[in-house]
Amino acid sequence: MGGQPGGVTEAVDSAVLALVFRAGPVFCALALDEVVETMRPLATRPLAGTPPYVLGLTIMRGAPAPVIDMTRLLTGIDGMVERYVAVEAGRGLIACATGPVLGVQDVRVAPPDGPAALFTGVSTSLIAAVGTIGAEPLLLLRSIRAVPDEVWEAAGQAPEDPP
């Protein structure tokens, strides 16, 4: 697909094959080439001193992985966790704790202009494009890299080497 990370192009309006899920009141999608697998929530151990959207650590594929609450990360509110979506984040796997997973769909999106340009904070770096599902807004997320260094260190992953 080319373009930005996660296969998102700079086209005015494009279709992206993506895994669609709920993060509380928001529909979200991850480009399918970023998704490793989906699963039921795994046992998660909390970590003190981490941002509120970091639920803790779990074991995926035999290795510790940070768990990110996507509802809290994107909306700041608590959401019901129904699934974990494993994504590769450069330093290892991350478990994205989500609401229901709605499946793989071609989603029509455009770069985040207009209302999406109002997003601030961590969500600004996460939103690659915006679209709709029916009459509801959908956020296409770019690579999930919102895990602080101290969480990676607690998971036993060495920091990335500087460029």
Image: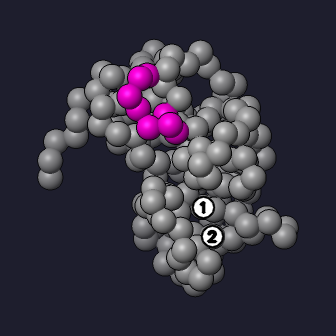
Could you classify mark 2 by the number of other residues whose Cα lies within 10 Å: few (under 14), some (14-19), or many (20 or more)? many
Q: Can residue 136 be seen in this view?
A: yes
Q: Does the magenta stretch include residue 30?
A: no
Q: Which of marks 2 and 1 is nearer the N terminus?
A: 2
Q: For the residues marked 2 and 1, what is the alpha-carbon distance in whole angstroms?
A: 6 Å
Which sits in the foreground, 31 or 21? 21
Q: Which residue is drawn at 59% across and 82% down?
A: 114
Q: Where is residue 56 in the image (x, y as percent from the top left)?
A: 48, 25
In the picture as drawn, the residue positioned furthest to the left comes out as: 162
In the picture as drawn, the residue positioned furthest to the right comes out as: 134
Judge from the rendering whether residue 61 lies leftward or rightward of residue 72; answer left or right: left
From which residue to which does the magenta span run? Answer: 47-54
Q: Name the residue under label 2.
A: 130
Q: Residue at x 35, y 39 (%)?
A: 148
Could you classify mark 1 by the number of other residues whose Cα lies within 10 Å: few (under 14), some (14-19), or many (20 or more)? many
Q: Does the magenta stretch include residue 50?
A: yes
Q: Cβ–Cβ below 8 Å for labels 2 and 1? A: yes
Hey, which quadrant is residue 132 in on the image? bottom right
Q: Position of residue 99 (x, y in %)?
A: 73, 40
Q: Residue at x 66, y 39 (%)?
A: 78
What amino acid type is highlighted by mark number 2?
Val
Q: Name the residue under label 1.
A: 140
Q: Residue 11 carries which label?
A: none
What amino acid type is highlighted by mark number 1?
Leu
